[in-house]
Amino acid sequence: MLKNYFKIAIVVLRRRKFFTFISLFGISFTLTILMVATAFIDRITTDAYPDAKRDRSLYISGISEVGYKTNWMRRSPTSFYFLDHYVRSMKTPVKVAISSNSASTNTYVNDKKITIDYKYTNAAFWDVTDFKFIEGKPFNQQQVANAERVTVISEDIKHEYFGDEPTVVGKYIEADNVKYRVCGVVKSVPITTYMLYSDIYLPYTVSKGNYKDKGYFGAYLGILLAANKADVPKMQKEFDQIAKRLPVDSKDYDKVIVKAESYMAAYLSNGNEKGLSGLTLATIIIGVFAFLFMLLPTLNLININITRIMERSSEIGVRKAFGASSVTLVYQFIVENLILTVIGAVIAVVLSLIIIHFINSANLVANLNLSINISVLFYALITCVLFGLLSGVYPAWRMSKLNVVTALKA
């Protein structure tokens, strides 16, 4: 039966080539955009470098103070003091990584201006993360305590600053008018991994800012590492208890809100105490965008399918006259539409590979290499089936309701 439906579908597609072209263009274009977007989201959410311990980590991306009477709210990354004094006192985490947000400065090499992003970290940052060291090693706790001007640099900045030098450990790099001795070079991180991305990493003790300030607000982020995955709920509970007891440091505010969350929740956190979390809100936005993006081509395909049905009214009338049921006709047309959608999906996969190759070659997002993997193909398959069903059910229902006599007269 399916074999016959396939043959009929191919004949129908070849009969009206222009309609077939319009249908395939709409399907393949829509699925191509969705596949490239899915590949981008998949890379951001699943790329484990240099953060392979996400399953046993919690992330602190910011802290808020809320005034219920004044309806005021202020939010910022946490201070170094908050992470060092409150979070590092926790018993469950085996390590607490502390790092600042990235900041930029300009430096010059051979009259060439280079923009360098720099980040301050503690020594535990290198134990919590899994950076791949191409040469050298990270700075240690003693060097941090001594406020030594040492740095770990990325592979990209090594090539940009030092050129073709085979090894740069022991050499000096200038940033913000200060020279730092290179102690290690790591594989570069894409900028989308904002909590870990930087060109150079410096001990927090060489920061020109006042990291000793005892307020809650600052420019630092935290990663809590549990001994194993099973300890994460316990670590979460311990942190929540600390967060509940935090005193408010201003009479204009009533409560301090700070969360230790999973990677994606922290990545998308909006800091609201009530309502939707950042992760939930982002999921809804992506879902609505995908639905609206698919809606227009789906409606167009429905109109084209209805036009095709009207052209096949005689065929439908004959089949009904010989006893074909409405269910059989609906099933046939949906199968035909799914075959059309699958052909469009195959074209979309080819187009997606070409576009992704161009994006990677052009290095539009540094160190972010997109790919079509099993996850992306799975979501593409689900989208393909939904697209085929959405655009095929209504026309198929219309076809099944055609009166035999009216259909034969057409």
Image (tube, rainbow, N blue to C red):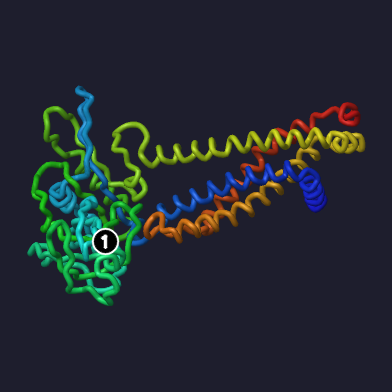
Compare residues 112 and 302 and report the one nearer the observer: 112
Q: Quadrant of residue 127?
A: bottom left
Classify 10 Å Cα crowding around label 1: few (below 14), some (14-19), many (20 and above): many
For disc 1, the marked residue is 128
Total residue callouts: 1
> Residue 69 location, x and y as percent?
20, 22
Note whether 66 is above or below 379 in the view shown: above
Residue 62 relative to residue 364: left or right? left
Looking at the rendered structure, the kind of residue marked 1 is Val
Compare residues 233 and 288 and report the one nearer the observer: 288
> Residue 305 location, x and y as percent?
73, 37
Compare residues 295 and 77 and report the one nearer the observer: 295
Q: Residue at x 22, y 51 (%)?
A: 103
Q: In which quarter of the image is residue 244?
A: top left
Q: Residue at x 28, y 65 (%)?
A: 160
> Residue 345 location, x and y as percent?
63, 51
Q: Residue at x 15, y 65 (%)?
A: 180
Residue 299 relative to residue 325: left or right? left
Q: Which residue is drawn at 76% across and 45% down?
A: 17
The residue at the far top in this view is 69
Note whether 266 is above or below 230 in the view shown: above
Label 1, secondary structure: give it: helix
The residue at the far front in this view is 111
> Residue 8 location, x and y as percent?
81, 48
Quadrant for the C terminus in the image: top right
Note whether 126 is above or below 281 in the view shown: below
Residue 49 relative to residue 36: left or right? left
